[in-house]
Image (cartoon, rainbow, N blue to C red):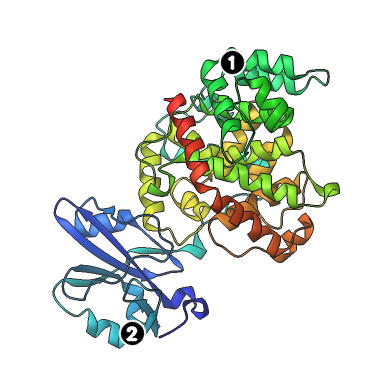
C-alpha cells in the first residue's frame, strides 16, 4: 500500500459516483484534473448527479465490471497510477496496462471527461479589476446587452434597512448602546437572533439574557453585537439555497463556526496585532456571502456550479468557480459588500481570504480568514501566515479544537437563527 500524502495528484486516481433514475455509474480521473460533467452528459446522454456527500478523498472503487465505469482517456498512458479501492485511505498501484486490463469489460470505456485544473484561468490579482472580469464573464452567458457598470447589469437586492442604519451608526464615534438597541429593536427577528446568540452555552453567561442590552453589556460587547447584527440583517435579504452543494446544506452553521473560530484566533494573537474583534466576527459571518449572491442573481448557473463542486471536492472552490462562472464568489461577494459601503477591511479581507501571500491593506484580517478556512477544511497552513499573525501551529489547532468541542452549542445557535429567519 502507498501513503497518499506522498503521491503526485497527476498519478492519483479520483473515483466519483454519479446517478440518475436509470442507475449509478462511476468515473475515474487523475486528481490534478476537474471532472467535466457537461462532457460526461454528452457521452452518456444522461443528466447525472453526484451521489456522495462532500468528500475530498473521493469514493472507493466499485468492483470492476460490476458497474458502468468511464475513465479519463489520458490514463491510457503515463502510469503508474494509484487508486483507493476501499473506504480506508490506502492506495494500490497500477500500471497503465494493468488499468486497461482491469477495465477491459463491456461496461467500461475510456473517454475525455476531465479538464487539466492547472490550465483553468485564475481570478485577477487586484480587486480593482474584479468588476471588469465579472462583466466579461456575465457577457458570456447572459442574453442581455452588456452594460458598462456591474450595478446596472445585475438585479442586485437592496441593502436591508436595518443594515443600512447599522452601517451609518458604525461611522458615528459618539454612538452607544442605546442607539444600537433602538435599531435592533425595530426588527423582532434580528432581536431574537442576537439574544439567542448571546444566550448560547458557548458563552456561558450566568442567568438569562433578556434583551439586546443584556447581550451587549454582559456577554458580547458593543462592537461584536453591532457587527453581528449587521451580518444577520444583511443575510435576511437573501434566501439560503435549497439545492446547493450538500456541504453547504447548513449555511448558518458554517457562518457561525467561522465567526467563533476567528474570535478564538483573534484572542490568541498578541494584543498589538489583533484586529477589531467585531470586524473579525463580521468577516467570519460573511466569508461565504458571495455564495448567497450567486444563488440570488444567477440561479441556473448556481445549480450547475453546485453539481460541479460536489463532483470536484478535491479542488479549491475558486478553481471550479473560475471554470464554470469565470469569477469567484469572493470576487462577487466582496464587490457587493463594497458597493453597499461596508467597512473596507471587511470586504477586502473576504476578497483576499484565499490568498495567503496577500500583503496589501487589511492583510491581517484576510490572513485570519485564510487560516480559519484551512483549519475548517483540515488543510495545511502556510507557516509564514501564522508568523505574521503572531500565532503558532499549536495555538491555531487549539482554537480549532475549542470550536469542535463546542459543536453541539454551535448547532443550537445555527438552529435558532434558522428558526427565527424562516
Q: CA distance from mark 2 to mark 1?
A: 61 Å
Q: Residues within 10 Å of mark 2 (few under 14, many from 20)?
A: some
Q: Position of residue 274 (x, y in %)?
A: 79, 46
Quarter in which the N terminus is drawn:
bottom left
Residue tagged 1:
161
Q: Residue at x 58, y 12 (%)?
A: 186
Picture quadrant of residue 23: bottom left
Name the secondary structure under disc 1: helix
Q: Name above or below for residue 34 compared with residue 91.
A: above
306 and 208: which is toward the camera? 208
Q: Say which quarter of the image contains residue 169.
A: top right
In this rendering, the count of numbered labels is 2
> Would you say 403 lies left or right of 46 here?
right
The earlier-in-sequence mark between 2 and 1 is 2
Tell me what residue is drawn at x 47 percent, y 77 percent. 4
For mark 1, does the 10 Å Cα neighbourhood hold few (<14), some (14 to 19), or many (20 or more) residues?
Answer: some
Q: Circle 2 sits on which residue?
A: 96
Left/right placement of residue 355 relative to residue 17 reads right
Q: Position of residue 361 (x, y in %)?
A: 78, 44
Is 336 above or below relative to 27? above
Q: Residue at x 62, y 17 (%)?
A: 184
Task: Give the side of residue 104 with respect to residue 338, left or right.
Answer: left
Residue 342 seen in the figure? no
Relative to residue 310, is residue 125 drawn left or right?
right
Amino acid at each position: 500500500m502507498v501513503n497518499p500524502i506522498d503521491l503526485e495528484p497527476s498519478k492519483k486516481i479520483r473515483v466519483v459516483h454519479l446517478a440518475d433514475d436509470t442507475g449509478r455509474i462511476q468515473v475515474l480521473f487523475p486528481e490534478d484534473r476537474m471532472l467535466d460533467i457537461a462532457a460526461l452528459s454528452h457521452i452518456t446522454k444522461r443528466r447525472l448527479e453526484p451521489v456522495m456527500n462532500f468528500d475530498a478523498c473521493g469514493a472507493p472503487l466499485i468492483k470492476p465490471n460490476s458497474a458502468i465505469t468511464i475513465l479519463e482517456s489520458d490514463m491510457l498512458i503515463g502510469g503508474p497510477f494509484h487508486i483507493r479501492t476501499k473506504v480506508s485511505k490506502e492506495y494500490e498501484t497500477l500500471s497503465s496496462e494493468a488499468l486497461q486490463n482491469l477495465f477491459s469489460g463491456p461496461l467500461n470505456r475510456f473517454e475525455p471527461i476531465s479538464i487539466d485544473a492547472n490550465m483553468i484561468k485564475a481570478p485577477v490579482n487586484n480587486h480593482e479589476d474584479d468588476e471588469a472580469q465579472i462583466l466579461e464573464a456575465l457577457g458570456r452567458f447572459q442574453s442581455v446587452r452588456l452594460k458598462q457598470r456591474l450595478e446596472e447589469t445585475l438585479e442586485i437586492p437592496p441593502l436591508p434597512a436595518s443594515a443600512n442604519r447599522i452601517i451609518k451608526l458604525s461611522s458615528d464615534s459618539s454612538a452607544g448602546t442605546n442607539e444600537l438597541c433602538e435599531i435592533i429593536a425595530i426588527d423582532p427577528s434580528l432581536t431574537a437572533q442576537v439574544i439567542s446568540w448571546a444566550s448560547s452555552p458557548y458563552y456561558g453567561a450566568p442567568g438569562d439574557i433578556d434583551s439586546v442590552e443584556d447581550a451587549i453589556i454582559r456577554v458580547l460587547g458593543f462592537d461584536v453585537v453591532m457587527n453581528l447584527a449587521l451580518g444577520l440583517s444583511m443575510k435576511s435579504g437573501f434566501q439560503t439555497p435549497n439545492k446547493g452543494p450538500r456541504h453547504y446544506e447548513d449555511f448558518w452553521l458554517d457562518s457561525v463556526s467561522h465567526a467563533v473560530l476567528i474570535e478564538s484566533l483573534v484572542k490568541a494573537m498578541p494584543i498589538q496585532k489583533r484586529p477589531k474583534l467585531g470586524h473579525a466576527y463580521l468577516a467570519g459571518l460573511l466569508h461565504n456571502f458571495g455564495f448567497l449572491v450567486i444563488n440570488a442573481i444567477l440561479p441556473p448557473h448556481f445549480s450547475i456550479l453546485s453539481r460541479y463542486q460536489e463532483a470536484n471536492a478535491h479542488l479549491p472552490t475558486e478553481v471550479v468557480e473560475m471554470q464554470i462562472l469565470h469569477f469567484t464568489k469572493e470576487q462577487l461577494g466582496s464587490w457587493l459588500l463594497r458597493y453597499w459601503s461596508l467597512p473596507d477591511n471587511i470586504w477586502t479581507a473576504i476578497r483576499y481570504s484565499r490568498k495567503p501571500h496577500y500583503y496589501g491593506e487589511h492583510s491581517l484580517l484576510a490572513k485570519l480568514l485564510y487560516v480559519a478556512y484551512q483549519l475548517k477544511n483540515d488543510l495545511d497552513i502556510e507557516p509564514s501566515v501564522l508568523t505574521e499573525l503572531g500565532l503558532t501551529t499549536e495555538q491555531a489547532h487549539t482554537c480549532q479544537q475549542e470550536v469542535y468541542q463546542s459543536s453541539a452549542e454551535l448547532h443550537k445557535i445555527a438552529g435558532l437563527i434558522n428558526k427565527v429567519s424562516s
